[in-house]
Structure formats: structure tokens, C-alpha cells
Amino acid sequence: MEAKIDYAMSHDGTSVLAVKAFQEMGSERVWDPRRIVIPFDHIVPANNEVTAALQAEIRSWARSQGIANLFDCGSGICHQVFSEQGFALPGTLVVGADSHSCTYGAFGAFGTGVGATDMAEIYSRGRLWFKVPRTISVKLTGRLMPMVLAKDLALYVAGKLGADGATYRAVEYTGQAVQELTISGRMTLCNMGVEVGAKAAIVPPDEKTDEFLRSRFKAPYVRVFSDPGSCQEELEFDVSDLVPQLAVPFRVDNVKPVFDLQGLEVDQVFIGTCTNGRLEDLAMAAGILRGKKVAVRTLAIPASREVYLEALAAGIIKTLLEAGVMIGTPGCGPCLGAHMGVLAEGEVCLSTSNRNFPGRMGKGGLVYLASPATAAASALLGAIADPGEA
């Protein structure tokens, strides 16, 4: 089916390719400059002359097209900024030139990622062809134990479904454990939907959704829910006894309990990214680190300028700095191995990011994925640690 796009997003990395394809297609004007969002987040500030030149080209193109929603260096990570600005609304179809655009499902939107050529088509016509995905219902029952976070849920699901367990499916998350998550937690859960192959990951909208959006978007919207009986597959997991989880190199679905790897030495800890760089993530880390000192180099990067300011006002940044943590410019940081914390050959990083593929954060580096609580506890010890014992 061909569907109308409500909002389209590309960042500093993918905009370069999308604009090139747009021009090669012979397109001259975008379909609606008000519905295109371009945050600079992947390599900010620019790390070399080539990056700086490419970013300058996108700024110039955006001005020529009348695109007002360009969020320049320092604004934050695309998915965080997009959500904070109220572009991800229940019942909308939002498409990003980034695989983790499934994050927008936390608001009851159908959020999905596409390649640069598809984004060029959207820029031109505001429409794109989709195959309607089959739906998997994942019901997570029970109440999470202390120090078990949304990231642990996401890793647990990845371990159960496998990296291709939901390929081109829509994953709908329900159950007590999901309902009790904050909006930030739901964003974490949906963000990692693509790590099981999902086309989209969705949490049905509720009062928490309305509360988040009330101060950010004034126009009315309609909550949209799945039709009864629309799910082709239903899975249910009781997570009452879930313990903190880790994804071990080099697969996101290679998931083990933290206590299986306790004591494994790490060279670096990274707290941030579109998965876990929000206020509650930084607050969790600060609560564990308060009055103590990290044993290894530790980097925390707020997901957006808004998050940074809130963390400053709450004293979170001060606590992290006093503990020896480095604070980076809002953006993706070392997640994609471009700058600010790239690993050396053989180094180990415990990261709150979403991928641990070979070379992800530097050639020859090893990345273990964990929650902000596990990351902070491990930073104190200089080795993988159970946050419940910190």
C-alpha cells in the first residue's frame, strides 16, 4: 500500500545521502518543508574538515528549501529531539532515515526507518509504499524488581526473540511491566525493536502519553489501537523475577544475566545514546555514583539540550562530574565509532547503547550492552557489576 507520511526525519549522516538522491531524481522542491525534521547528532561537533563541509551543505540545502525544523549541533539525538518537539504523535506515520526510528512507537505512533533513496522519495512526494507488517504481541507481566530497568526488559526480549525473530513485523508491547514504564522507559523498549528485526515497535498510548505530549503539542490527536484479533502471534513473559541483563559481543541477542559475567574488567563505561541518554537514565547513574569515584574512564552524554539543562538544574551533572565522569555534547557520541570515546584494539566498553557489532565503537573493540544502573555500578568497580550490590 502507498501511505501518506505525517513527518519525515533525517540526521546529519543520512541527510547527505537523501539530498543527493533527491537531486539525482530531478526533484527541486520538497513536498512540505514543515513536515521535514533534520537534527544534527551523529558527529557533533564536526570531527574533521570533511564532516564540517557535509554539514554545511545540509544547512544550505535546508535553508533553500525553507525547512525550519533543522536542529543544529548541540540540540541532541534525532529521536530524542523529534519526540521532545512533539512530532511523534499517537496514530501518526513517522519515518526516519535511521534504523532506530521505531523509538516513536513509545507514543503509539507507527515509527519506522528507511534508506536514503526512500527518504528522497518522501521528500519529493510525502508518500511511500509499505507492505503492511504482521503483528506480534509481546505481553510482559509482573512488576520489575529494583535496579531492573527498561533496558533489561529490551535485552531480555531480544534474547527471547532472537535478532531475526520479528523480521518485518510490528511488535506491540503490553502488560503490567510495560504499563508501569515511564515514557522514557517505553522509548528505550521501542528503540531496540529493530534489534529483533521489527519494522515497528509500539506501546499503546495512555494517560502517560497524553501527559508527556500535553505541554509539547497543542493540536488534537487521536489515540489509535490495534483491532481485536489483529495479532498473528502472541507471546507472554512473566518478568517478576527478571535480573539485570547484558548483551555480550557480538550480537544483541547474545543475552546473559549480569551475574554470569561479574568481575569482567572493562576499560570504558558509556552512559548515553538514543537508548539511554534521558534524564531518568542520568539520574539513575548519579544516584549510584554520588559521593564515590569511578575506577575507569566513564563518559555520559545527555540525549538532548533539554535533558542536559534538566540534569544541570537537578544537580545530576555536578554529581557525575564529581565522581570523575566526563560529560559530552548532546548527541550520539561514540555509539557509532566516529569520535568522543572510540575504543582501541582489544578494549572493552560497557555501554548503554543498542548495538555491539564488531567494530561498532572502534576496530577491535568489544562492547557489552547494559542498563544505566549496571553501567554506573561497573564504572565504580572497573569491572562488570550487579547494580543491586553497588
Image (spheres, grey):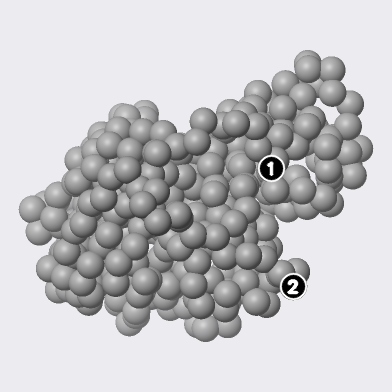
**What is the three-letter code of the residue carrying label 1?**
Ile
| Inter-mark Cα distance, 1 to 2 | 20 Å
What residue is shown at x 30% (from left), y 76% (from top)?
Answer: 288
Secondary structure category for the residue under label 2: loop
Looking at the rendered image, the quarter that the N terminus falls into is top right
Residue 58: % across, % down: 78, 36
Residue 328: % across, % down: 53, 57
**Res 326 label:** none
Cβ atoms under marks 1 and 2 closer than 8 Å: no
What residue is shown at x 68% (from left), y 77% (from top)?
Answer: 215
**What is the three-letter code of the residue carrying label 2?**
Lys
Asked whether 265 or 200 is in front, the reply is 200
**Res 5 label:** 1
Q: Residues within 10 Å of mark 1 (few under 14, many from 20)?
A: some
Left or right side of 225 for 49: right
**Up-down relation of residue 78 to residue 99 (above or below):** below
